[in-house]
Amino acid sequence: MIALIQRVLSAQVDVDDQTVGAIGPGLLALVAVQPADDEASTRRMLERLLGYRVFADEQGRMNRSLKDAGGQLLLVSQFTLAADTRSGMRPSFTSAASPEQGRRWFDRLVELAREAHPGVEIGRFGAHMKVQLVNDGPVTFWLETP
């Protein structure tokens, strides 16, 4: 599983001109599922999303996690993160999970996140989404799980 996380002051996802998910300060996580993903990789990704230290402590160092900071989490499925771009001029998506598998593990990630943390919002799986954000920093990291 791959997640591109961005520390945000705010973020929202619109589908067909309707907001389907919006957060204040926290993390926007664009998430891609890969064929080898399973329950263990999904749980590990959630652990990293909630525990990765990207928020400033009293000394201004990135030493606080989303849980520590009390921030919100916006999860957005984005299979294109799994693209193979190493050659040619067009991405290959052979390293992305099938839509069925992607939905299964993305939905499981959402379920686990909502059980573990308040303030979880989501985009709409498989929809054409418009994502808006105010990146704080900017602070952006690429997370992967085996």
Image: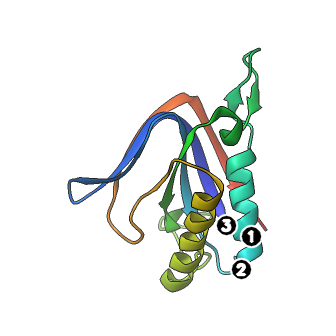
x, y percent for residue 31: 56, 61
Res. 83 in view: no
Question: Is label 2 in a helix, a strand or a loop?
Answer: loop
User: Mark number for residue 36?
Assistant: 2
Which corner quadrant holds the C terminus?
A: bottom right
Residue situated in front as seen by the camera: 142 or 21 = 21
User: Mark number for residue 101?
Assistant: none
Q: Which mark lies nearer to you, 3 or 1?
A: 1
Question: Is 96 located above or below residue 118 in the figure?
Answer: below
Q: Which mark lies nearer to you, 1 or 2?
A: 1
Left or right, residue 55 beside residue 106 = right
Q: Residue at x 49, y 63 (%)?
A: 78
Mark 2, Cα crowd under 10 Å, few <14 / some 14-19 / many 20+, is few
- In space, the residues marked 1 and 2 are separated at their CA atoms by 9 Å
Q: Are marks 3 and 1 in contact (CB under 8 Å)?
A: yes
Q: Residue at x 53, y 72 (%)?
A: 107
User: Mark number for residue 1?
Assistant: 3
Which corner quadrant holds the N terminus?
A: bottom right
- In space, the residues marked 3 and 2 are separated at their CA atoms by 8 Å
Q: Are marks 1 and 2 in contact (CB under 8 Å)?
A: yes
Residue designated by label 1: 41
Left or right, residue 21 beside residue 89 = left
Q: Considering only order in the chain, which callout, 2 or 1, is on the residue closer to the N terminus? A: 2
Mark 3, Cα crowd under 10 Å, few <14 / some 14-19 / many 20+, is many
Question: Is 64 located above or below residue 85 in the figure?
Answer: above
- In space, the residues marked 3 and 1 are separated at their CA atoms by 7 Å
Q: Residue furthest top?
A: 59
What residue type is disc 3 on?
Met
What residue type is disc 2 on?
Ala
Q: Considering only order in the chain, which callout, 1 or 3, is on the residue closer to the N terminus? A: 3
